[in-house]
Image (cartoon, rainbow, N blue to C red):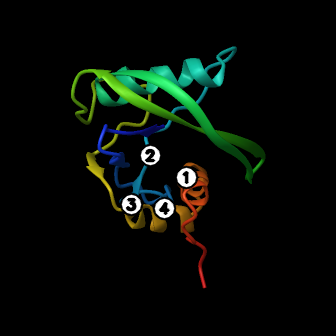
Amino acid sequence: MVIRRPDGAVLVTKRPDDPEDPLAGVWGFPAVTCAPGEDDRSAAERVGPAKLGVTLAIGTKLGDREQVRGQYLMRLADYEAVITDGTPTVPQADDAVTQYVECAFTDDPLVLVPAAQRGSLCTQIFLDAIGLDWHIG
């Protein structure tokens, strides 16, 4: 989810420290895995209450990308959203999904480059959409 404030700043989140998680400790976007039978937009709506304690209005799809991870094919889509109720706070009480350890609004897309370089599809989609070269080298 690319959650924007009216001034254009986006909400970024940090995942918990986990030596097996290549995205631990870097800024990225809130995300969720689709439940069986759930479509992208429904899953996107679930990000707000489950991970941030807010209600979201889901907007335009920014793009999607696929990546093979081990024996799985992961497909990820970025959607724009705005908060319609609440203030983002982390972590939430739902331990059935990955909870974030920090969240903040930023207008500096460069904070997302480390996540993109570590393989975060959602940050790659966003950085490509705004025309920022995040590639290593």
**Camera-nearest residue between 135 and 133:** 133
Q: Which residue is mark 1?
A: 126
Q: Do the residues bearing badges 3 and 4 touch, measured as CB atoms within 8 Å?
A: yes
In the picture, the disc for residue 29 is: 2
The answer to which image quadrant residue 73 occupies is top right
Judge the density around disc 4: few (<14), some (14-19), many (≥20) Cα neighbours within 10 Å: many
Q: Please report whichever mark, 3 or 1, sits nearer to the chain's N-terminal start.
A: 3
Residue at 36%, 37% in the rendered image: 99
Q: Do the residues bearing badges 3 and 2 touch, measured as CB atoms within 8 Å?
A: no
Query: What amino acid is labelled 2 in the image?
Result: Phe
In the picture, the disc for residue 115 is: 4
The correct choice, above or below, for 46 with respect to 77 in the image is above
Q: Do the residues bearing badges 1 and 2 touch, measured as CB atoms within 8 Å?
A: yes
Q: Secondary structure at mark 4?
A: helix
Q: Please report whichever mark, 4 or 2, sits nearer to the chain's N-terminal start.
A: 2
Query: What amino acid is labelled 3 in the image?
Result: Val
Q: Position of residue 76 (x, y in %)?
A: 65, 41
**Camera-nearest residue between 115 and 1:** 1
Q: Position of residue 108 (x, y in %)?
A: 34, 62
Query: What amino acid is labelled 4 in the image?
Result: Ala
Q: Which residue is mark 3?
A: 26
Of tags 3 and 2, which is closer to the observer?
Answer: 2
